[in-house]
Amino acid sequence: MLKCEACGVELTGNLRRCPLCQGTLDGGPDDVVPSPLPSQRVFLQSRRLAAQIVTFAAGLLVILGVFFMVLFDWPWRIVLACCLSVAVTGLYAVNAIRQAVGPLRLLLRAFYVVELAALIWFAVLGSRIVTMFVIPITTMAAIGTGAILMMVLGTEALDRFFKYFVFNIVFALLPLVFLPLGWAPWRLLVMVSALVGVLFAFALAVFAHRQVRREFGKQFGA
């Protein structure tokens, strides 16, 4: 009997990888009973087609953006920021499709895509709305999602999403750099974001310090 540890399903037949996530399978193949799941080829073909559709759609939006910029004299900075944001979002979607990312990981990674797109807008347009509002709010939403996962899944959340929790804490503190640089004149949300990150880290240290130590060594080789 074959088993996929990532999906938690048992499979029969002579499969090399899980048809759901393409992860490696544990156990031995069963040549007697056919697999109840469709062949891997069907999943790979549909996934490849979806990735191609997303790539085409993102490329089409970029081409149309440049076309209308030239045709209607749209501000090139705004068009550039839009095109880069579309490209980043498209790459994220294609990567998620090809790797068959689970819904919870998809959600946690989406916060990083939003922050990256926001940084692109700030780099191109210099809008301080991004540094004062968008990035701190997105970071707090990511930490709030992590806290909900901890309450619902308990210690299992640390087993599955520990790296995301660490990254969220780091990203919550990074906006503090905006203050001395003058990028966040209204600093309330930046300070609140940092406070939320510190409180989340403190909660992990108090309520799950042993598992945090173990996961930190396992994930980061410490």
Image (cartoon, rainbow, N blue to C red):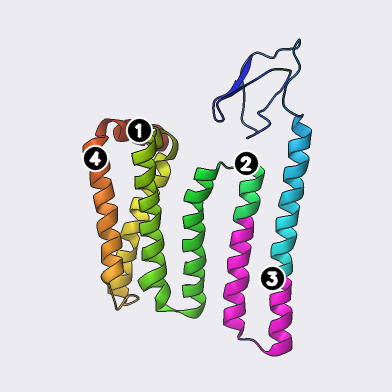
Kind of residue indicated by mark 2: Ala
Disc 2: which residue: 100
- Dots 3, 1 in contact, CB < 8 A: no
SS category of the residue bearing label 1: helix
CB contact under 8 Å: marks 4 and 2: no
Q: Nearer the viewer, residue 80 or 29?
A: 29
CA gap between label 3 and label 1 equals: 43 Å
Residue 120 drawn at (x, y percent) = 51, 69
Q: Which residue does the numbered mark 1 point to in the structure image?
A: 155
Task: Give the prevailing secondary structure in the magenta stretch.
Answer: helix
Residue depth check, mark 4 versus mark 1: number of the one nearer the observer: 1
Q: Is residue 210 visible?
A: yes
Residue type, label 4: Ala
Name which of mark 4 and mark 1 comes first in the sequence: 1
Q: Quadrant of the C terminus?
A: top left
Q: Is residue 222 visible?
A: no
The crowd level at tag 1 (other Cα within 10 Å; few <14, some 14-19, many 20+) is some
Residue at left offset 74%, top offset 39%: 44
Q: Which numbered circle lies on residue 62?
A: 3
State the separation of the CA atoms marked 4 and 1. Answer: 13 Å
Q: Earlier in the sequence, mark 4 or mark 2?
A: 2
Q: Earlier in the sequence, mark 2 or mark 3?
A: 3
How far across and down, in percent of the image, does residue 58 sit?
Answer: 69, 63
Number of callouts in the render? Answer: 4
| Magenta stretch, residue numbers | 62-91
60 relative position to 139: left or right: right
First of labels 4, 3 by sequence position: 3
**Residue flagged by tag 3: what amino acid is it?**
Val
